[in-house]
Image (tube, rainbow, N blue to C red):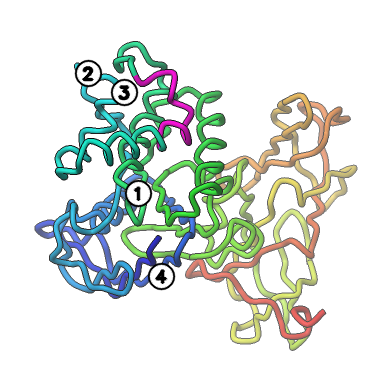
Amino acid sequence: MASVTLEKINKVFGRDHIIKDVDLTIGNGEFVVFVGPSGCGKSTLLRLIAGLESITDGDLKIGGDVVNELPPRERGVGMVFQSYALYPHMTVYENMAFGLKLAKENAETVDGRVMSTARILQLEELLHRKPKALSGGQRQRVAMGRAMAREPRILLFDEPLSNLDASLRVQMRNEIARLHNRLGSTMIYVTHDQVEAMTLADKIVVLNGGHIEQVGSPHELYQRPATRFVAGFMGSPTMNFMPATLVSSDHLGCRINAPGIGEMALPQDAQHLSKGAELTIGVRPEHLRLAEPSADNRFDIVNVEYLGNEVYVYLDPKEGDTLIVHRSEAPSQWKEGQAVSLIPDTTHVHVFDQNGKALPATQASAAA
């Protein structure tokens, strides 16, 4: 195992500044997931750690040692790619042994590590097969085994499940989680899928435009997003956003007015903002309640999705083109074309300023 520390890491390709002053510490044995939309820099950051790309500026430390100039084979990392990248003419055993043989390990060491890794990944019965005789999930396990057999200090995963179908992704997520529990090794995992991030990570790093938006546990990012970007990215269905204005504020909280819903007393600290300041409120689908419509609070249901154990109700937002989503347990009394009122749970309403930063809770509400 080894810790990884990134200090003011930058990466520039020509005129494009891809990674911007990234500071991050990954502890021994942590499972950390880099998540974000396409082009945010997550795969580039992983390749910088692996040594597959050079660092433009900053220091990268593994186990306390600066490794900026070390080639990949000397960093003690193993990498699992999106494509399996297996040698089709080699058996599973030969694929897993290939890196060890290149490192000039003796035959006894090679056999011992391959067999030990095969037991962990339940590949013992497949060692004689070639990749074409394996399923997608089996091939991905072989790719993981090839990296693990070298006994790296850190395992890196670059979107390893994106080529698998939905049911197999769920199975492989569970296998990777169990693998981390058994090995206790430091793992860094890149994905654009926030479900993978939420289910696998000890710590999630949300990237946007080459910089870090927020670092925290899945619970922290879901319950206390620091920015509107994080709030909208984490969670499925996504958080609902609605415009609002500041009515008043004091040390106990603030009052805001959300058009179509009305005034709400919230526990956020808005004392640094002026009355009438433009805000955005965010409410997750499970924190909205529907009721009979009123003259001042009336929204039309445009679609109802039945998903077996739960129902998604989509409502006309009145402003903007993104539908408001309400989530509830099945069965549902709500029907398409019906008018309802929206009642947010004020203890779970998030408030964001014009820069997309979340307003903090007041000291009084935090203490409570």
Q: Which residue is mark 3?
A: 92
Identity, as a three-letter code, of the amino acid under mark 1: Leu
| Magenta span main SS | helix
Residue sitting nearer the eye, 136 or 142: 142
Q: CA distance from mark 2 to mark 3?
A: 9 Å
Q: Which residue is mark 4?
A: 25
Mark 4 and 1 residues: CB-CB less than 8 Å, in contact?
Answer: no
Q: Earlier in the sequence, mark 2 or mark 4?
A: 4
Residue 156 numbered tag: 1
Instruction: Say which element carries label 2.
Output: loop
Who's the residue at 79% across and 65% down the image?
Answer: 347
- Give the secondary structure at mark 3: helix
Mark 4 or mark 1: whose residue is earlier in sequence: 4
For label 3, count other residues whose C-alpha is less than 10 Å away and answer few (under 14), some (14-19) or many (20+). many
Q: What is the span of residues highlighted in magenta in the rendered image?
A: 117-127
- Residue 42 rendering spot, x and y as whole percentages: 34, 52
Q: Is residue 213 left or right of residue 260?
A: left
Q: Residue at x 27, y 19 (%)?
A: 91
